[in-house]
Image (cartoon, grey):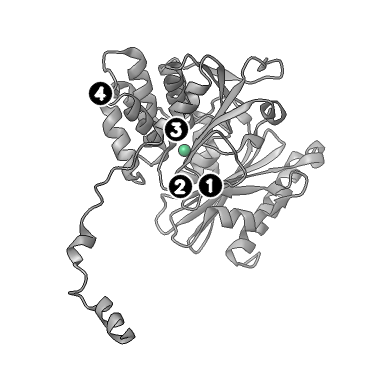
Amino acid sequence: MADSSVESSIDPTAEPRLRAVKPEVKKKKSQWSSLAAVLEKHRGKKLLVVLVGYPDPDNIGSGLALQFLAREYEIETSLLSFHEVSHQENRALVKQLELDLWLYDERADLSEYELYALVDTQRPEATPIEEELEKKTLIAVVDHHKRSSDVEAEFIDVREDAGSTCGIFAEYLEASLPEGLDSNEPEHIKLATAMMHGIRSDTRIFIEASQQDFNAAAYLWPAVDQALLRKISAQSLSPAVMDMIQSALERRRVYDNYLFSDVGFVRKENRDGIPQAADFLLTRAGIDTVLVFGVVNGRTIEGSLRTRSDTVNPDAFLKKAFGIDEEKGSHYGGGNVRDKGAFQIPIGFLAQHNDREQLYRLACEIIHEKFLEAIGQEAGS
Ligand SMILES: [Mn+2]
């Protein structure tokens, strides 16, 4: 009896195959109703959207979307960032759309904000106001990075398979405004344009987009100002970034499919040139993984990893290469599972050394050595 049942389950006629290839048509219910309930619960309070790390199109667009959605519940929202917007495209976004980003300084009074939210990140500890945030209620975390187990919020929506956080927010918008955004309404145009830019920027202009991102783009499209979008995304490189790319090209060292390079000393406002140099070098034929670093403000070694390899996992690669910062108890570097990562290593006490060139050589040697170890090459080979 047992035998016949095994046989029947592998008999191709026993299970109608056509059923299996039928596309999944059942639409997943949007999480919007849960987020809406949280916003309703906090009606009339003030909300801080905390932009962790450098402001970028995806976190800015997501912050604007949450601000827009929360307004319906009389929740006044401010977008707080901790770094000056540095990438030329992002500066253009802020300027062209006249966005109101609040740049944190120690004198800022955050006490009137009872609520906070995280978009495009799950790491409140990566801000200088971690203690202050502990006194506030974390109402929402919406993100598409790797799910972190230690974040707790009233509403959590983390989708690792989404190409952008803006794409997730567009789904909420669609659920709350199914008739679509109004292409005659300046606020709607601004929001749609910023979100479309966020999706494009995080998905390499849709090459790495998920179905979620395409649905989002289709929803936003009628209200997008395409001339403005073109202007924002076609900003020319600043001379400083171009010089950094040139340095990275000149100093490149190639090991099989790997390319290693550095850009020298970098001013804080130009640090976005490091990932841009890495992106550029990755376009070289025969290379699938690039690591570029520089010394930012004379105090921190900052680097970016970019890969197209099927076997290199940026997060694992950087964690293995640079290890743990004992003081902070966290890794010096990390990234997503697919194509990008970054690391920051403080130079600390040694930054006081007055021979900058010597200091730089030392930093360079250490990073190079760790990189070679990580790719399994001997130094000097
Ligand atoms: Mn993102």
- Residue that label 4 marks: 179
- Residue that label 3 marks: 34
Front: mark 4 or 2 = 4
Residue type of the residue flagged with mark 1: Arg
Residue at disc 3, CB closer than 8 Å to ligand 1: no
- Residue that label 2 marks: 160
Mark 3 or mark 1: name the one nearer the start of the chain: 3
Q: Would you say the residues marked 2 and 1 are in contact, meaning their CB atoms lie under 8 Å apart?
A: yes
Q: Determine the residue positioned at 40% across, 27% down.
A: 235
Is 128 on the left or on the right of 148, as rendered? Answer: right
Q: x%, y% of residue 234?
A: 36, 29
Q: CA distance from mark 1 to mark 4?
A: 32 Å
**Disc number for residue 147:** 1
Query: SS of the residue at dot 3?
Result: helix
- Front residue of this view, candidates 179 and 91: 179
Q: Would you say the residues marked 1 and 4 are in contact, meaning their CB atoms lie under 8 Å apart?
A: no
Q: Is residue 135 visible?
A: yes
Query: SS of the residue at dot 1?
Result: loop
Is 77 on the left or on the right of 179, as rendered? Answer: right
- Front residue of this view, candidates 106 and 144: 144
Q: CA distance from mark 4 to mark 2?
A: 28 Å
Residue type of the residue flagged with mark 2: Glu
Query: SS of the residue at dot 2?
Result: loop
Residue type of the residue flagged with mark 4: Glu
Quick one: label 3, few (<14), some, or many (20+) residues within 10 Å?
Answer: some
Residue type of the residue flagged with mark 3: Ser
Mark 3 or mark 2: name the one nearer the start of the chain: 3
Q: CA distance from mark 2 to mark 1?
A: 7 Å
User: In which quadrant is the N terminus drawn?
Assistant: bottom left
